[in-house]
Amino acid sequence: MTTTYLITGANRGIGLEMARQILKSGDRLHAVCRNPDSATELNALIDASQGRGQIYKADACDELALANIANTIVGGIDVVVCNAGVMSARGGIEDSENTADAVSTVLMTNIAGPFFTARAFLKQLKLSKTPKICIISSFMGSQHHQGASAYFYRASKAGANNIMVTLANELKASGVTVASFHPGWVKTDMGGSNADITPVESATGLLQRFLLLTMAKSGSFINFDGKELPL
Ligand SMILES: NC(=O)c1ccc[n+]([C@@H]2O[C@H](COP(=O)([O-])OP(=O)(O)OC[C@H]3O[C@@H](n4cnc5c(N)ncnc54)[C@H](OP(=O)(O)O)[C@@H]3O)[C@@H](O)[C@H]2O)c1
């Protein structure tokens, strides 16, 4: 039986690697990104997928664009992966990159983005026998991660985890399982070259976690290797 996924931010980094592994395993993919025209690697994957993949254009903060995509999708989606995310100022209280615009972008993308994505595709999720919403968060957002920098990135991922718990509570009655995930410290544009693991290792672990996720674990925050994390 094939699984149908939808991934935001599917054009590079962890999202692109998840897309690659999903299509390689014979599953189906709705791949969302901001600029399909320049998403060369993603387009090559979709072109080689024999009709199992489709690419769509939307910013994760654009609720209308997401809703318009949802209106074109016939059939169910089993797993919605809210992966699109941005880092913001990485410094401390004096970091001049913490401007109102930058703060707004990181909070909108990392908190409202998963909410708008989950809401847009709820109709398709409800057609699945095992619907799941998987939010790619970060352990930097945990209250147990004693950071002293990157204020708004941390706050945004704490917010994403909070949204995750509320979605899990509200959607339980509809049978939709919701969880958030730490992908590890990953060698991507965001994680940098000194990070611990490759996108392949992260995506492999995350996709296993999505598959094994059940309603009993709805509302959980889970590491890419399966360990449960404190919110
Ligand atoms: N790498 C790590 O070590 C690490 C650790 C913890 C958590 N994470 C989380 O993992 C997720 C993926 O990160 P990554 O490392 O793969 O980052 P990345 O290489 O920087 O890729 C980020 C992806 O998100 C997309 N994106 C950003 N803002 C968007 C928006 N407003 N609308 C739609 N797409 C948007 C980007 O699209 P464009 O190409 O259009 O910019 C890109 O596809 C993020 O949520 C991140 O916070 C990463």
Image (spheres, rainbow, N blue to C red):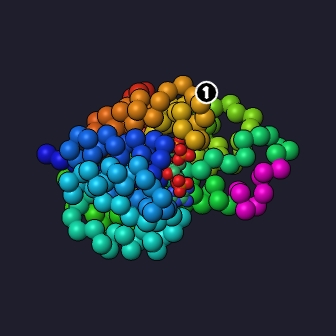
Of residues 59 and 137, the one drawn nearer to the viewer in this rendering: 59
> Is residue 86 in view from this perspective?
yes
> Is residue 168 found inside the magenta-colored segment of the image?
no
Q: Residue at x 29, y 55 (%)?
A: 47
From the top left corner, tell me how far across and down residue 70 is, in percent. Answer: 34, 69
Seen in the picture, residue 154 relative to 175 is either above or below; the reply is above
Q: Is residue 71 left or right of residue 182?
A: left
Within 8 Å of ligand 1, the CB of disc 1?
no
From the top left corner, tell me how far across and down residue 134 is, in percent. Answer: 40, 47
Q: Is residue 14 left or right of residue 121?
A: right
Give the quarter of the figure containing the N terminus.
Answer: top left
Seen in the picture, residue 192 relative to 43 is either above or below; the reply is above
Q: Is residue 183 left or right of residue 128?
A: right
Q: Residue at x 63, y 32 (%)?
A: 145
Seen in the picture, residue 124 relative to 6 is either above or below; the reply is below
From the top left corner, tell me how far across and down residue 144 is, in percent. Answer: 61, 32
Of residues 112 and 171, the one drawn nearer to the viewer in this rendering: 112
Please name the amino acid that badge 1 sits on. Answer: Asn
Count the marks.
Answer: 1
The quarter of the displayed image where residue 196 is located: top right
Which residue range is magenta in the image?
96-103
Give the quarter of the figure containing the C terminus.
Answer: top right
Q: Residue at x 59, y 50 (%)?
A: 86
Q: Which residue is mark 1?
A: 194
Q: Which residue is at the far left?
A: 1
From the top left corner, tell me how far across and down residue 206 is, in percent. Answer: 38, 36
> Is residue 119 in view from this perspective?
no
Q: Residue at x 82, y 45 (%)?
A: 95
SS under mark 1: loop
Dot 1 crowding, Cα within 10 Å, few <14, some 14–19, many 20+: few
